[in-house]
Amino acid sequence: MLEDGKLLAGDPMPQDTLIIEKVDDSHAHIIVESTQTNGAECSADGVAERNGDKLIYTEKGPIGAGDQFELFIFGGVIKLRYLKDSGLGIPPFCGSRGRLDRLEFALKSARPAKQP
């Protein structure tokens, strides 16, 4: 459990989460959430556009508008790479001490989304 941005002693690290749900042949709704070892939190939630074998997400909200990353598969893992940064002076989609572009999600760990 995080308290004031810090993990309490004995608490397990929260698990990074990536959810991808197909919207249509060209779009997918994605949710990325990460609480990093230093307590920094990162997240993105919205519709990404398919570009070849990658998904491109562009932030449309009031903070970080234009920030952009791509999701791609390399060596059995889904990776994230920053493409554009709005220049706010902090890593896109994170607080000042976090980075989404270091996350990897193993395909072998993938499981179907829970159905309502």
Image (cartoon, rainbow, N blue to C red):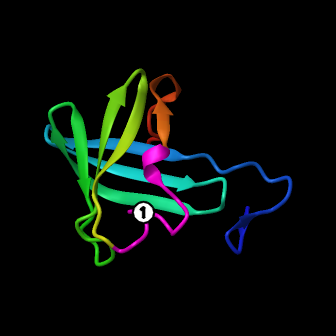
| Front in this rendered view, residue 48 or 84 | 84
Which residue type does callout 1 highlight?
Pro
- Secondary structure of the residue carrying tag 1 is loop
Horizontal side, residue 115 vs residue 61: left or right: right
In the image as oriented, which residue stretches furthest toward the right? 10
Q: Which residue is mark 1?
A: 91
Above or below residue 47? Residue 90 is below
Question: Residue 17: x and y, percent?
Answer: 51, 46
Magenta stretch bounds: 88-102
Q: Residue furthest bottom?
A: 62
18 versus 34 height, above or below? above
Q: Position of residue 19 (x, y in %)?
A: 41, 44
Task: Give the x, y percent position of residue 33.
Answer: 49, 54
Does 76 sit left or right of 65 as displayed? right
Tell me where residue 47 appears, x and y as whole percent: 25, 54
**7 horizontally vs 77: left or right:** right
* Image point (34%, 29%), residue name: 73
Residue at the image position 73 percent from the left and 61 percent from the top? 1
